[in-house]
Amino acid sequence: MTKPAPAWPSATALFGTAGSPFAGNPFAGNVLAGNPLAANPFAAGHHHAMTAWVQLNRAMLEGVGKLQQETSRFVIRRLEDDLERQRQILEAESPEQAWQAYADFARQAVEDYTAEAGKLSEIAAEMQYACSGFGEMLASAALAEKPGA
C-alpha cells in the first residue's frame, strides 16, 4: 500500500493568518492573486529589486539570443561561400584562374567579417542600452522599498 501524498497547507493558511511566519508581509496577499514573487520571502520583501533583476535578465538573454542567431547565420553563409570558392579553385583551368578565385575568396571573406563585426557590435550596443537602466531601476527600487517612503 502506497503512502498518500502529504497535504500541503493552503496559501491562506501560510500567508493569511496571524500565526504565519509571513504575517504582516505586505506582499503576502499577492500569493492568492498569483504573484509568484510573494511566495518567496526575500523576493516579496524586495519586489521592486526583483522586478528590476528580471527585466535585466530578460534584456541580457534577448541580446545573447540575437548574438547567437546572427553568429549562426553568419557561419552558415561563410561555410556555403567557402565551399563555393573551393569548388571554383579546384575547377580552375589555369594557375591564374585559381589565383583569381582565391583572391576573390580572400576579398569576400574580409568584407564579410568586417560587416559581421559591425552587425555584432550593433547588437551588443542594443543589449548594453537595454541593460543600462538597471542601476537606476535598483536605485528606484531601494527608494520605493525604504520604510516610510
Image (spheres, rainbow, N blue to C red):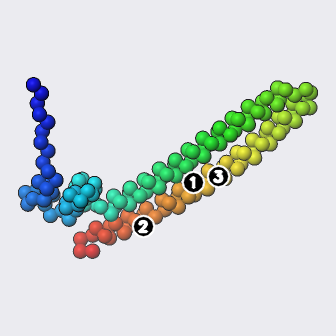
Instruction: Please tell me whether mark 1 sits on a helix, a strand or a loop.
Output: helix
Q: Residue furthest front?
A: 1
Find residue 46 and report its horizontal and vertical position in percent: 28, 61
**Mark 3 Cα within 10 Å, few/some/many (few <14, many 20+)?**
some
Q: Is residue 102 left or right of residue 46?
A: right
Q: Is residue 108 visible?
A: yes
Find residue 75 and report its horizontal and vertical position in percent: 64, 39
Residues at marks 3 and 2 touching, judged by CB atoms closer than 8 Å: no
Q: Which mark is residue 136?
A: 2
Q: Looking at numbered disc 1 in the image, what kind of residue is underneath it?
A: Ala
Find residue 144 and report its horizontal and vertical position in percent: 31, 70
Residue that numbered label 3 is attached to: 119
Q: Tell me what residue is drawn at x 37 percent, y 67 percent.
A: 139
* Cα–Cα span, label 3 and label 1: 9 Å
Q: Is residue 51 left or right of residue 115?
A: left
Task: Looking at the image, tell me whether mark 1 or mark 2 is earlier in sequence order.
Answer: 1
Foreground pick, 121 / 35: 35
Q: Looking at numbered disc 3 in the image, what kind of residue is underneath it?
A: Lys
Residue that numbered label 1 is attached to: 124
**Mark 1 Cα within 10 Å, few/some/many (few <14, many 20+)?**
some
* Cα–Cα span, label 3 and label 2: 28 Å
Q: Which mark is residue 53?
A: none
Quadrant of the rendered structure where residue 99 is? top right
Task: Looking at the image, tell me whether mark 3 or mark 1 is earlier in sequence order.
Answer: 3
